[in-house]
Image: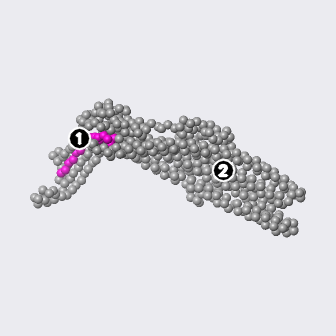
Amino acid sequence: MGHCLEGAGLSPPRRQAAKFGLTPRATRTGTPWRLGVLVFNGLALTGCAVGPAYHAPPTPPTASAGFISGGPVSAAAQPLPPFWWRLYQDPILDRLVGEALTANTDLRVAAANLAYAQGLLDEARAGRFPTTTVTAGGTEGRSALQALQAKPAGFAYSAGFTAAFQVDLFGRVRRTVEAARADAEGAAATADAVRVTVAARTAGAYADACGYGEQLAVARHSLDLTQNSFDHSMIRRNAGALSDFDIDRDRVTLEQAKAAIPPLEGAHRAALLSLAALTGGTPAEIPADAAACASPPRLTQALPVGDGASLLRRRPDIRAAERALAAATARIGVATADFYPTITLGGGVSNAAAQIAGLGNASTGSFNIGPLLTWSFPNILVARAHVKQAGAQTAAALARFDGVVLQALRETETALTTYDAELRHHAALTAARVSADEAQRLALIQFKAGTASILDLLTAQTAAVAADQAVAASDQAIADDQVAVFEALGGGWEREPIH
């Protein structure tokens, strides 16, 4: 294929696309062509297409290895399952993600964009077939000669049929179809990327709603403890055992406990509103079961993450970038075809008569048939500029592809690093909570025995509540970090198998 022009007796091509780092098949020639040879050989060249041959670009060798971030507790080499949210075994989460993947408005937009790209592909494929036109009409008027002869205007009927077929000698149509097909496949990959995002955001919004529910429960429990402590202090103050200073100090703690609740309520409400929008609902349609959740979903085993090779195969944004590069490469061939003549085989028949019944008479009919050659030679400056433009766009598409690959690897490694660090953070917070609970228990015993002051008890209680709040916030962070890992891995775009 690389020398299809030489095989037809044409001069060797100039390598226009070599400077773009691509492998050209054929480009323009500088030798004048004889029309007869061109037409004769052109019919045998229907398998020839000018422009560079596309080859999928390589990825860095180290990109296919296992991930270097995380640890045995946070990540495992097992492959990521298609519907990763089912690992949580939470029927509420399963239902919400299913609703989002059905009703989300972003997915509807992506589906419409895909349908548009497929329509453009159908339009490009139509170039492989002849174009046909049927005309019919009636007109009233008179010619200049009739006017000179003072003849009255007359009514005439006409009908005609024309057909034209572009002989795809140098693959202009094929390259156009190739580019349109790559665009449609890229639009499909973009739609898959939206599915990944929607699934992850839905799971993240649900985890946030549950996490804020847990933090609200802890904050309200803290308020109850602080209120009880304040009430007890008031009793002792009325008995003369405490001063106004002690009461004011306890009141500060009480008001701080009250102040912690409204921000959490606002964040909880915002997460639920986000969840309703993601699932295609209005603010009045917040899922009641999600609103009642008070414990974020969390996997206790290492996350199945696979390796770099599976990541590069699975990420839809990488596939979309690769298809964009394929489309840009094909358009170099479309631009390169402008260096060569375009031959169109066409013909038509027409008929005109004063009466409709006369349209069928051979005496009033005419026909034409034959090839039409169009060629911008010798002024090829515009064609040369088009090839340069297409080559530059292809180089940009290649750079974007390389950038998307690096971004995918960075996002995944970053998500694994953050998740592993939060697991270790959570373990330390859990140990601190155990110690704070024990300190609170001992302070209460000593206070009842009269060996500890109310300040000692209050300090121990405050530390215990703070430890509970820190663990609850870490529970939510772990759930969010797990979702971030799954989103970075690019899972969730696969469709349900048909049984």
- Identify the amino acid type marked 1: Gly
Q: Which mark is residue 370?
A: 1
Q: Is residue 388 left or right of residue 408?
A: left
Q: Residue at x 79, y 64 (%)?
A: 250
Front one among 168 and 455: 455
Q: Quadrant of the N terminus?
A: top left
Mark before the other along the chain sequence, 1 or 2: 1
**Magenta stretch: residue 350 in it?**
yes
Front one among 114 and 364: 114
- Name the image quarter holding residue 36: top left
Q: Which residues are magenta?
A: 337-353
Relative image position of residue 292 (x, y in whole percent):
67, 55
Give the total of numbered labels. Answer: 2
**Magenta stretch: residue 116 in it?**
no
Q: Is residue 74 left or right of residue 373?
A: right
Q: Give the dominant element type of the magenta stretch: helix, strand or loop.
A: strand
Residue furthest out toward the left: 149
Q: Residue at x 79, y 52 (%)?
A: 437
Q: How many residues crowd around disc 2 within 10 Å: few (fewer than 14), some, or many (20 or more)?
A: many
Q: Residue at x 40, y 37 (%)?
A: 18
| Dots 1, 2 in contact, CB < 8 A | no
Q: Is residue 396 left or right of residue 478?
A: left
Q: Is residue 432 left or right of residue 452?
A: left
- Identify the amino acid type marked 2: Ala
Relative image position of residue 237 (x, y in whole percent):
84, 67
Front one among 180 and 58: 58
Q: Which mark is residue 477?
A: 2
Can the viewer see residue 88? no
Q: Which mark is residue 171?
A: none
Q: Is residue 354 above or below residue 325?
A: below
Front one among 269 and 179: 179
